[in-house]
Image: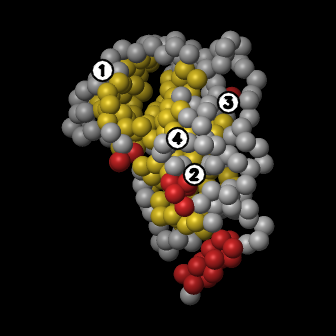
Amino acid sequence: MVRRILAALIFVLCFMPLVIAQATGTRIDLYFSDWHNAKPHTTQGTLEERDIYTRGDPHNPTQKGAVLRFINGYSYATLAPHASTNATRLDGEQEIYFVASGHGTANAGGQTADLFRNVAVLMPANLEFTIKNTADAPLEMYLIREPTPPGFRPNSDMLVRDGNKIPIASSSGHWAHIDKPLFTTGDGLGTLEAVILVALDPLTMGRPHVVDHDDIEEVWTALEGTSIAFVSNELRRQTPGMSFYHIPDNKTPHCNINQNEDQEVSFLYFARYHPHETRK
């Protein structure tokens, strides 16, 4: 009965007359990406990265995943057991690391932070740092690169947040989102405005919505559990490691649906909504 009710709700949403769906079929494929399908390349000496999204034109992508206007890059990064990155100092950009699995440490400016599942690190510009894998299994992380605007004052230290301990900030955003903010502009983001852990309880869904401006950059990545991504007039199975980029055409709706009866699903979400005042 519950499944039939949910199916009926999805049917209504897909065909509701107020939805103006622009992107369909193969065009939507350009905005979905899964790091499992990407070719690896090496950065910082030993960090193996697989691109999820790269710079491009979100209104007319020339290839799958080439959609970023405001963020420099988004990838899945793996550090081999007991490996350490080269000492790195970021210039003109910052990096946000979110640990998907494994154990390690981040070292910067005399500070050391333990890395494990659901820990996030905001590594500011101009601070030399290294990341080390301290375990016998790979250290796996999502890596967001955000540019810093001219005149921006970065944090003096790396900022670490444990998503396992952050209290829920909202359980009703867009109907049913359970939000745990990791970083906001006030925490030292230069371009982004939010990096959030979002969960959906079983048999719940977010509100389908269209953003009414086109200068947004918004990404949803499935962390745990298989869910349904509702984009335009299509339903797509979203498995862990798969991301979708909100199509910024002011007309294409999106939301997430947890169709499971007994399993929560979770996402890593980040967004740039509007230009914001540079911190000097």
Crowd around label 3: few <14 · some 14–19 · many ≥20 (10 Å): some
Q: Amino acid at mark 1?
A: Gly
- Between the C-alphas of marks 3 and 4, the distance is 31 Å
Query: For numbered disc 1, what is the local secondary structure?
Result: loop
The residue labelled by disc 1 is 45
Circles 1 and 4 in contact, beta carbons < 8 Å: no
**Residue drawn at x 50%, y 23% as measured from the top left:** 123
Q: Closer to the N terminus: mark 3 or mark 1?
A: 1
Find residue 195 and name its label.
Answer: none
Q: What is the three-letter code of the residue carrying label 4? A: Thr
Which residue is pictured at 54% across the width and 81% down the height? 3
Sequence-first tag of 1 and 2: 1
Residue picked out by circle 2: 198
Residue 127 location in percent, x, y? 49, 13
Placement of 219 over or under 127, stated as above or below: below
| Residue identified by numbered label 4 | 62
SS for dot 4:
loop
Marks 3 and 4, the one that precedes in the sequence: 4
Identify which amino acid the numbered label 3 is placed on: Thr
Residue 136 relative to residue 192: left or right? left
- Are there few (<14), some (14-19), or many (20+) residues within 10 Å of tag 2? many
Q: Residue furthest bottom?
A: 1
Pointer 2 and pointer 3: residues touching (CB < 8 Å)?
Answer: no
